[in-house]
Image (tube, rainbow, N blue to C red):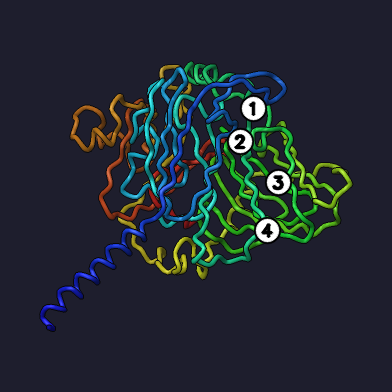
Amino acid sequence: MVKCFIPHLVFGVLAVLGVSLVNAEDPYLYFTWTVTYGTRSILGVPQQVILINGQFPGPKLDVVTNNNIILNLMNKLDQPFLMTWNGIKQRKNSWQDGVLGTNCPIPPNSNYTYKFQAKDQIGSYTYFPSTLMHRAAGGFGALNIIHRSVIPIPYANPDGDFTLLLGDWFKTNHKTLQQSLESGKSMPFPDGVLINGQTQATFTGDQGKTYMFRISNVGLSTSLNFRIQGHKMKLVEVEGSHVIQNLYDSLDVHVGQSITILVTLDQPPKDYYIVASTRFTKTVLTATAVLHYANSNAPVSGPVPAAPANGFDWSMEQARTYRWNLTSNAARPNPQGSFHYGTITPTKTIVLANSAPLINGKLRYAVNGVSYINPDTPLKLADYFNIPGVFSMNSLSELPSGRAATLATSVMATSLHDFIEVVFQNNENTMQAWHLDGYDFWVVG
């Protein structure tokens, strides 16, 4: 009796475990996006923009930690198109990253299905086109990863959630901008600043309640200062990490950067200015929106709040106040600081110095004296299939060379499981924003 019963018991347990494993798979979200041109009067002048499903900016992607995203993108433009998911780690999945080193652009009248997971991540992010100056015409949007309900967060659940996409904007067509850059000219000064693709917007909340604002700079070249008239802003998350919760009157948001703040509507019921203005520019461009108290009958009044008077030094000092919260979790139950990155001995140190040299009489941008040329074959494919002649491991030095700038498909070699210390060196007289794509990077200084 016993001998006959035990196998059935084992099989029964295995069957139950099998059902549990199937049911425990993380949810899948399916999207179909069509990328087209459209006409919008962004700054009072009709111009061609890039729409996603007819929307400018594109649809907001709200997902939950560990969700699987299956997104079929159809390109109806007259140029190849490529979308990158800024901040998504793409673990062992770099060919979904949407940049030229890993992906071929989607040809006109063709489609590609992106498949990726928001694995062990939370926070406010963006997506945007990564080639041919398409970002200057739109095609960008918000990508928000919300924590799982079983994982606590280091603040009370907010009463509402607003997403704000800030950015500089140009009236010039994106193809004209591209041709200008390729001819050796520098980027022109922008024509304006937008909030969610508009020059006017209103965000409504109830007095006494606290709201989350997810703020990203989706512009091309200009740092912006963000502030709300008469209200303090509590910074709670930067680039997917919970931070020490300091209060700020205003916050600098640099190109490509995303932050999350909490704002309590604790002022008398009226309307208040929301302001985004350019930083480190001789001419200051400003966009305003309205924070509207639901019980307000009074419009905005008074002068628009001014940005900080000081420039780079003030901004750098503010950035130094962003501290990782080592006692709170992020996407997982364990604290963010449970792995002691500060005790790691780096395998190597790489110093990357940006410059803007003239090469063959044209302005180019370079790193360690090499201005990048994109090959016809994506680097990941060339590496995987050992295709010769696409790139050389000796094309880029690990330290600034001081040599005359050259053109090359610059590639630097590292090894699996290496911990690399990267130092960025900016000798130019403008603020630089680096897009560190595809891996985990930890700011240590």
Residue extending farthest left: 3
Dot 3 amino acid type: Asn
Say whether marks 2 and 1 touch (CB < 8 Å).
yes
Q: Which circle, 4 or 3, is nearer the viewer?
A: 4
Quadrant where the N terminus is found in the figure = bottom left
Q: Position of residue 199 (x, y in %)?
A: 72, 32
Task: From this view, report whether residue 38 is shown above or below residue 419.
Answer: above
Foreground residue, 414 or 42? 42
Q: Circle 1 sits on which residue?
A: 190
Q: Residue at x 77, y 43 (%)?
A: 290
User: What is the distance, in whole Å, between disc 4 and disc 2 at their CAs?
Assistant: 32 Å
- Label located before the other in sequence (4 or 2): 4
Instruction: Tell me the SS state at disc 1.
Output: loop
Residue extending farthest bottom: 2
Dot 4 amino acid type: Asp
Q: Residue at x 70, y 50 (%)?
A: 250
Q: Does residue 136 appear anywhere in the picture?
A: no
Q: Circle 4 sits on which residue?
A: 159
Q: Residue at x 26, y 31 (%)?
A: 391
Q: Position of residue 367 (x, y in %)?
A: 41, 35
Q: Does residue 97 appear anywhere in the picture?
A: yes
Instruction: Tell me the SS state at disc 2.
Output: loop
Q: Circle 3 sits on which residue?
A: 310
- Label located before the other in sequence (4 or 3): 4
Instruction: Tell me the SS state at disc 3.
Output: loop
Q: Specify few, some or many for label 4: CA neighbours under 10 Å numbering under 14, 14-19, or 20 or more.
A: few
Q: Circle 2 sits on which residue?
A: 222
Q: Specify few, some or many for label 2: CA neighbours under 10 Å numbering under 14, 14-19, or 20 or more.
A: many
Task: From this view, report whether residue 222 is shown above or below residue 65.
Answer: above
User: What is the distance, in whole Å, between disc 1 and disc 4 at their CAs?
Assistant: 36 Å
Q: Which circle, 2 or 3, is nearer the viewer?
A: 2
